[in-house]
Structure formats: C-alpha cells, structure tokens
Amino acid sequence: MTKSELIKNISAQYPHLSVRDIEMATRQVLDYLSDALAEGERIEIRGFGSFSMHVRPAKQGRNPKTGEPVLVPEKRVPHFKPGKELREQVDYPEVVAGGKV
C-alpha cells in the first residue's frame, strides 16, 4: 500500500474528514517517525510493532567486477519488529481445497 492509497482508504472510511487534513496528519506522523529514528530513538506502537536503528559495522568487501578489496563503511539501517498482535493477525492457516480450514 502506498501513502496515497492509505490516504484514500482513510478518507473513504471517514468521509467527514477532508482529504487535505488526512494528508497533513499522515505526513506529520511519518515525518515524526523518520525524525525520531534519525535521532536514534526507538518507536513502539503497541499491538503493531517497534522500529529501531541497527548498526551494520564496517567490513571488507570486494568489487564484483575487478575483485579488488573495498572497505564498506558502517551503516545505520532502520529495523522493524512486528508485535505479537500483528504477527497473529497475518499468520493465518492456509485454506485447503474446498474452502475449509
């Protein structure tokens, strides 16, 4: 789902809210989450999951074309860990033939 699809779905579910207000609120939430992660903060949304930053240490890599050793610098990457409720919601049993579980 893209951000525009999210805004469209929210506006369909809450027609009394203007699309412009929904866009602004969505942008504000996403900007806040991005800024908090950039500052190294951990974000936890109960029932959904948590976002944190992981550090990948510097390592010795190789240029695939020449085989020459290359130093790959340290990286900070965002990490998402789903919460228990979200894991249970998406982990459904497969439907067997005939439509029965």
Image (tube, rainbow, N blue to C red):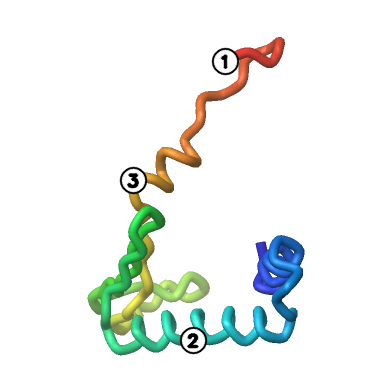
The answer to whether mark 2 and mark 1 are in CB contact below 8 A is no
Q: Quadrant of the C terminus?
A: top right
Residue under label 2, please give it: 31
| Amino acid, disc 1 | Val
| Amino acid, disc 3 | Lys
Residue under label 3, please give it: 84
Q: Is residue 60 depicted above or below 81 in this figure? A: below
Q: Is residue 41 depicted above or below 49 in this figure? A: below
Q: Position of residue 33 (x, y in %)?
A: 42, 80
Query: Mark 3 or mark 1, which has the lower sequence index?
Result: 3
Asked whether, in this view, residue 46 is left or right of residue 9, the answer is left
Estimate the spatial distance between the alpha carbons at disc 2 and disc 3, rounded to whole Å.
Answer: 25 Å
Identify which residue is drawn at 71% across, 63% down.
Answer: 9
Q: Position of residue 4 (x, y in %)?
A: 72, 73
Q: Is residue 98 depicted above or below 6 in this figure? A: above
Identify which residue is drawn at 72% across, 86% down.
Answer: 20
Asked whether, in this view, residue 2 is left or right of residue 82, the answer is right
Q: Residues within 10 Å of mark 3 (few under 14, many from 20)?
A: few
The answer to whether mark 2 and mark 3 are in CB contact below 8 A is no
| Amino acid, disc 2 | Asp
Residue under label 1, please give it: 101
Estimate the spatial distance between the alpha carbons at disc 3 and disc 1, rounded to whole Å.
Answer: 22 Å
> Helix, strand or loop at disc 1?
loop
Query: Mark 2 or mark 3, which has the lower sequence index?
Result: 2
> Helix, strand or loop at disc 2?
helix
